[in-house]
Amino acid sequence: MTSGTESTAQPAATAFAADVVRYPIAPGYRVNVRSGPGTQYRIVRTLAYDVRVPVYCQKPGERITGPYGTTALWDNIADGEFVSDAYVNTGSDGYVAPRCS
């Protein structure tokens, strides 16, 4: 999941930044941000190295293997923007935020 333009995550319009924890992306990775929970969704942007992202909600999707294991869990980091939880150091293999509706 590399290449593209650099950017940092923006808060979702419906969430309060103070209510959301930011988690680090795996060191040395520029992760593609997708419009949905799988690689078949378009790339919205690519995260810069060493960023921390908010996780507003999570939902199941395509199984991905990354530095933090293999998972079907995808993290919503902004309105209409998802990254595989396999690249986010949440400290858990399960949900750390509410399920996306």
Image (cartoon, rainbow, N blue to C red):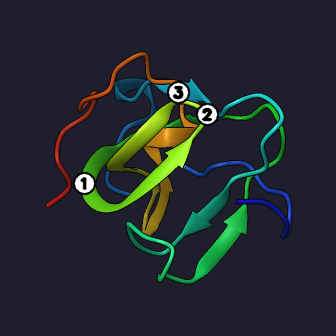
What residue is rendered at 54% in x and 70% in y?
Answer: 34
Answer with the quarter of the image where residue 4 lies.
bottom right
Q: Nearer the viewer, mark 3 or mark 1?
A: 1
Q: Is residue 16 above or below residue 73?
A: above
Q: Could you tell me residue 67's position as x and y percent?
A: 61, 33
Answer with the quarter of the image where residue 13 lies.
bottom left
Mark 1 highlights which residue?
59
Residue at disc 1, secondary structure = strand
Neighbours of disc 3 within 10 Å: few (<14), some (14-19), many (20+): some
Q: Could you tell me residue 80's position as x and y percent?
A: 43, 70
Mark 2 highlights which residue?
67
Q: Could you tell me residue 27's position as x and y percent?
A: 77, 28
- Which residue of the protein is positioned furthest toward the top in this rendering? 91
Earlier sequence position, callout 1 versus callout 2? 1
Neighbours of disc 1 within 10 Å: few (<14), some (14-19), many (20+): many
User: Could you tell me which quadrant the C terminus lies in?
Assistant: bottom left
Mark 3 highlights which residue?
22
Q: Is residue 55 visible?
A: yes
Depth order, front residue of 66/55:
66
Distance from Cα at disc 3 to Cα at disc 1:
17 Å
Tell me which amino acid carries mark 3.
Answer: Arg
Look at the numbered discs 1 and 2 and tell me whether their residues touch, using CB distance below 8 Å.
Answer: no
